[in-house]
Image (cartoon, rainbow, N blue to C red):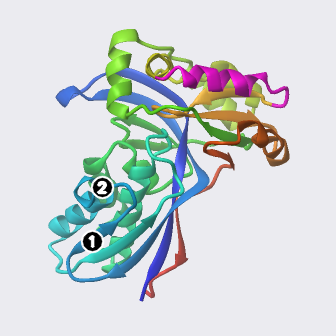
Amino acid sequence: MEYILQASAKVNLFLDITGGLPGGFHAVDTLMQSVDLYDTLFLRPAPGIRIDCPGVAQEQNTAFRAARLFFAKSGLAGGIHARIQKGIPFASGMGGSSADAAGLLFALNELFSRPFSPEVLSHLGAEIGSDVSFLLRGGCMRCRGRGEELSPVPNAFSPAYLAVRADGFVTAGQAYAAYDRVGGAHGDVDAVLAALAQGDGEAFLAHTANALTDACAALCPAIPATLSRLREDPACLGAFMTGSGSVCIGVYPDKDAAEAARPRFAGGFCAVLQNTPRSLVWAIPPEM
């Protein structure tokens, strides 16, 4: 039997860097929102662990690390064959590899009779990557520390997003190293939280910021150019970069307005997205 799970992307509605952590990591204060763009995981219990994902060697895949960690921590015998169909672009700032790891952790926990509570599963996710804990849950959350300290955030702001990938490639490691050199804007998280709770898009856009934008712009000049192109559209309420880029997010009042702008960005990755209440959705669930 093959089971199918969809694992969503995320958008950083706010991202600040608040200091350093042991091991050379950065402390963040970020607001993440899950959106309706998905990687699809096709899963089948099998001897050993096998992860097939186009363009990613198995040993370098975070989903492989997640499976290995699950079996090591649970002490369970077994294995999984997972085939990953990518919908979330690589190195986009939308959490694609973390979504795959979160999806695999969640699916394994379901398939093997839930040996871990949601809280323990979240801690396992944090061992794999900064966004994995959030992507096990989704919705809208404030994420601090390395991203593993989660608290739900009321979000009544429900626009449509036009996600446009700038022509370039920035890894998270490159982005944070560049931030250490050039710094970045910090925004006002309290004002953003209030704006989201009230559904006030104007106040949200006035106060939000992504501290990595200047650093990523220095590495990839197409990022500020793409943000400018989005902001030039009269229907676009505002634009920002998500995560460490290179996807830029245009904010539109509704899906029709975002779809109307989409042809202007033909030729590369471009998608109209909306908020989702959770990150992981079974298409074909296991029988429990």
**Marks 1 and 2: in contact by CB < 8 Å?**
no
N-term mark: 2 or 1: 1
The quadrant the N terminus occupies is bottom left
The magenta stretch spans which residues?
220-235
In the figure, is residue 199 to the left or right of 122?
right
Label 2 and label 1: CA atoms lie apart by 11 Å
In the image, farthest residue toward the top: 182
Residue 248: x and y in percent read: 60, 33
The quadrant the C terminus occupies is bottom left
Residue 273: x and y in percent read: 68, 48
Secondary structure mainly formed by the magenta segment: helix
User: Regarding mark 1 in the picture, which secondary structure is present there?
Assistant: strand
Q: Amino acid at mark 2?
A: Asn
Q: Is residue 74 magenta?
A: no
Q: Amino acid at mark 1?
A: Arg
Specify the label residue 117 is tagged with.
none
Toward the viewer: 271 or 149? 271
Q: Looking at the picture, does residue 44 appear above or below residue 63?
A: below
User: Regarding mark 2 in the picture, which secondary structure is present there?
Assistant: loop
Q: Which residue is mark 2?
A: 61
Toward the viewer: 116 or 169? 169
Q: Which residue is mark 1?
A: 50
- Label 2: how many residues lie within 10 Å, few (<14), some (14-19) or many (20+)? some
Residue 123: x and y in percent read: 29, 52
Residue in view at x 74 percent, y 23 percent = 231
In the figure, is residue 231 to the left or right of 89?
right
- Label 1: how many residues lie within 10 Å, few (<14), some (14-19) or many (20+)? some
| Quadrant assignment, res 22 | top left
